[in-house]
Amino acid sequence: MRPTSSGKGVLADGREIAVKRLFYNNTHRATDFYNEVNIVSSVEHKNLTRLLGCSCSGSENLLVYEFLPNQSLDLCIFGK
């Protein structure tokens, strides 16, 4: 299992983002990170948040997603 933390931020253009921070301590896990980025960035679905970008630097890697407010999935899907 890999340690993670997450947070919320705002880009210069005003968009809210969710940032997931991943900590890796070896090359094998770094490969897993690159595979995750490739898979997540190639999948598009209206019920999934989009991966906006990533940063790969040292033992700390960041995934930047579009931010969706915490609400019921039913509300997001059906709009009720």
Image: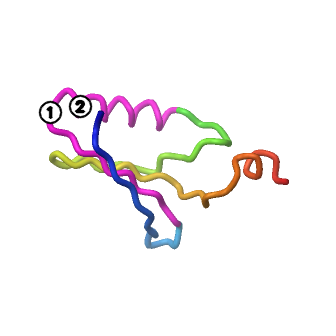
Provide the secondary structure element on which disc 2 rests: helix
Label 2 and label 1: CA atoms lie apart by 6 Å
The front one of 67 and 71 is 71
Which three-letter amino acid code belongs to the residue tagged 2? Arg
Q: Where is residue 31 in the image (x, y as percent from the top left)?
A: 25, 29
Provide the secondary structure element on which disc 1 rests: loop
- The image shows residue 67, relative to residue 25, as above or below, that is below
- Residue at screen point 21% across, 40% down: 24
- Residue at screen point 30% across, 33% down: 1
Neighbour tally class for label 2: few under 14, some 14-19, many 20 plus, Cα within 10 Å: some
- The quarter of the picture where the C terminus appears is bottom right
**Span of residues in magenta:** 16-42
Neighbour tally class for label 1: few under 14, some 14-19, many 20 plus, Cα within 10 Å: few
- The image shows residue 8, relative to residue 61, as above or below, that is below
Q: Where is residue 17 in the image (x, y as percent from the top left)?
A: 48, 61
- Contact flag, marks 2 and 1 (Cβ < 8 Å): yes
Q: In this view, does 9 lie to the left or right of 57?
A: right
Residue position for label 2? 29
- Residue at screen point 61% across, 61% down: 69
Q: Position of residue 28 (x, y in %)?
A: 20, 26
- The image shows residue 18, relative to residue 30, as above or below, that is below
Residue position for label 1? 26
Query: Is residue 24 part of the magenta span, yes or no?
Result: yes
